[in-house]
Image (cartoon, rainbow, N blue to C red):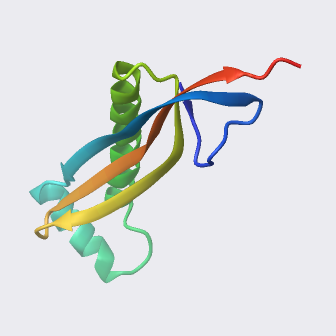
């Protein structure tokens, strides 16, 4: 599956647009992780517990988006973007979204 943030895929032409596609993940650090992150935030700097959580959530959101695009018959996702929000004070929602498309290599 080709996933790009651009409107075009270099070296390919868009044959068909399949429509909007997304992958959604909601994650919570858990009580222990929240306590450790809270203590770490007192000292300033990067809070690795949250960095790791959000990196993992983004990867899973893209994986789900790709799975959904494949189910639609696409072989590419163009204009892929992320969005995120907080649910309550303990959970993060991450969504990867774009347009599912069928592309083919340009023959020269």
Q: Vertical placement of 104 versus 33: above or below?
A: above
Q: Percent x, y for residue 17? A: 49, 33
Residue plotted at (20% across, 49% down): 26
Farthest right residue in view:
108
> Picture quarter containing residue 100?
top left
Residue plotted at (20% across, 50% down): 27
Q: Vertical placement of 48 versus 69: above or below?
A: below
Q: Vertical placement of 7 versus 40: above or below?
A: above
For the image shown, how many numbered marks are present on the structure?
0
Residue plotted at (33% across, 46% down): 57
Q: Percent x, y for residue 28? A: 17, 53
Given residues 85 and 29, the one toward you in this image is 85
Q: Is residue 74 left or right of residue 42?
A: right
Given residues 62 and 11, the one toward you in this image is 11
Given residues 14 and 4, the one toward you in this image is 14
Residue plotted at (69% across, 29% down): 13
Q: Is residue 73 left or right of residue 40?
A: right
Q: Vertical placement of 2 versus 91: above or below?
A: above
Given residues 15 and 71, the one toward you in this image is 15
Quadrant holding the C terminus? top right
Q: Percent x, y for residue 61? A: 34, 41
Farthest front residue in view:
16
Q: Percent x, y for residue 64? A: 33, 33
């Amino acid at each position: 599956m080709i996933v790009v943030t651009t409107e075009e895929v270099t070296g390919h032409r868009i044959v068909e647009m399949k429509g909007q596609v997304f992958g959604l993940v909601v994650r919570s650090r858990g009580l222990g992780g929240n306590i450790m992150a809270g203590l770490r935030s007192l000292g300033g700097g990067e809070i690795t517990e949250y960095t790791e959580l959000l990196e993992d959530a983004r990867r899973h959101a893209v994986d789900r988006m790709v799975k959904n695009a494949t189910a639609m018959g696409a072989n590419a996702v163009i204009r892929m973007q992320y969005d995120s929000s907080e649910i309550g004070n303990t959970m993060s929602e991450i969504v990867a979204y774009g347009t599912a498309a069928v592309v083919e290599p340009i023959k020269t």
